[in-house]
Image (cartoon, rainbow, N blue to C red):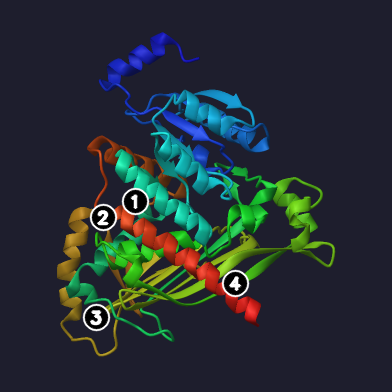
Amino acid sequence: MVSATILSCESAARQIKPTVRLITLDPGHFHAALVQKSMYEEVDPHVYVYAPEGPDVRQHLDRVKAYNKNAENPTHWNEEVYLGNDFLYKMLAEKKGNVVVIAGNNQNKTRYIERSIEGGLNVLADKPMAIDKDNFQLLKNAFNKAIEKKLLLYDIMTERYEITNALQRELSMLPEIFGTLQKGSPEKPAVEMESVHYFYKYVSGNVLTRPTWFMDVAQQGEGITDVATHLVDLVQWECFPEKIIRYENEVKVNSARRWSTDLTLSQFNAITNQNDFPDFLKNNVIHDSILQVFANGEIQYQLNGVNVKVTARWDYKAPEGSGDTHYSALRGTKANLIIKQDAEQNYKPTLYIESLPGSAASYENELKQSFSKIQAKHPGVELKKIDTGWEIVIPEKYKEGHEAHFARVMEKFLLYLKNGNMPAWEVPNMLAKYYTTTQALELAKKVQQNK
């Protein structure tokens, strides 16, 4: 327990009485812990955890304990844990908090979301909130109930806080620099985004142990409905900022495909610390020792008439010195805005402005004048002339890193809670996002079955 003296001192220092009490429900993904890597004035340090007994919840609690012991900026969370198969019923019956954090096995996540909303609790959920068309219908119901009950349901979109993504969005809103977004074509989309993730990775300085169910697309979701969620969100957020998107008539999925990442048993062991494939994965094992994980997907679709292509890929392990990578291209009538993160960029996301062939001679002057608006908001950001256009030089102070972005999402969510609502575009655009990914999965499966 945290001593009354410590709590008293903190309260006096903050002059704010915590109004948010967190509940963590069945944590199975490390994102559940990353939400607690920082402290928040509005959030009570006493957190209630409800989960079945098993390695998932133990790893979650170990991560939170490690944050409490950080040499710099240690947290002081106090976890009260209930373990049992009736954990969901117990959480709803006791209702000890007012915000449920859900990040774990995605097979039951949408049902957890719906039940939590029905129980009168706000929900902050990790992506994806729906992994197939049936869960999308549940999610629609959950949003309708949240509106009725005046509750907030929000997903954790960390990529909006990556500085290159934020600057790409801001530059696209400056017609002197970008012009307007092209429509493109299926052969040459106006918007392209690709994300490459790795099963073997480090989190908070340690090799991440993945749960075995993470390799089961029935529980984790396929690449099209998992990682692609971030990409579809960025497309909407950057290309149609603060605009309401109605998926019924503004989203058209043209084509989609899926393919597997093949893992050997030794690679599976390195990721999960398990020596054998569990029974629920046996149907995905070929040649007795190769596990096929359909973690990869590509979607080609139209959003408000703009042709878009997003690709989500998973490989086993990143090249030395690298990690997850991101590529993004927005094609405008005056310039293209490109984010690259390859060996040439030392695997660091780097943003470029590429003026189009035949641009007016005055373009460079117009660019520099208009770029001052970016510099006023982000002091220290500079333009660097290169052969293909300009590189955006970003000071290190803006490069927080992926783990720090979870605190940004939580801060935004807490602001929405305080205000009692979200911007009008957030809910319809979340629905548009999950409609896009789940429809794409249906199409990709049909295409594969017909081959």
Q: Earlier in the sequence, mark 1 or mark 3?
A: 3
Marks 1,2: beta carbons within 8 A = yes
State the mark number for residue 334: 3
Q: Earlier in the sequence, mark 4 or mark 2?
A: 2
CA–CA distance between discs 1 and 2?
10 Å
**Residue 193 percent coordinates (x, y):** 44, 70
Q: Answer above or below: position of 333 versus 429.
A: below
CA–CA distance between discs 1 and 4?
41 Å
CA–CA distance between discs 4 and 3?
38 Å
CA–CA distance between discs 4 and 2?
48 Å
Name the kind of residue labelled 1 in the image: Tyr
- In the image, which is nearer the foreground, mark 1 or mark 2? 1
- In the image, which is nearer the foreground, mark 1 or mark 4? 4
Give the residue at mark 4: 445
Q: Answer above or below: position of 107 versus 64.
A: below
Name the kind of residue labelled 3 in the image: Lys
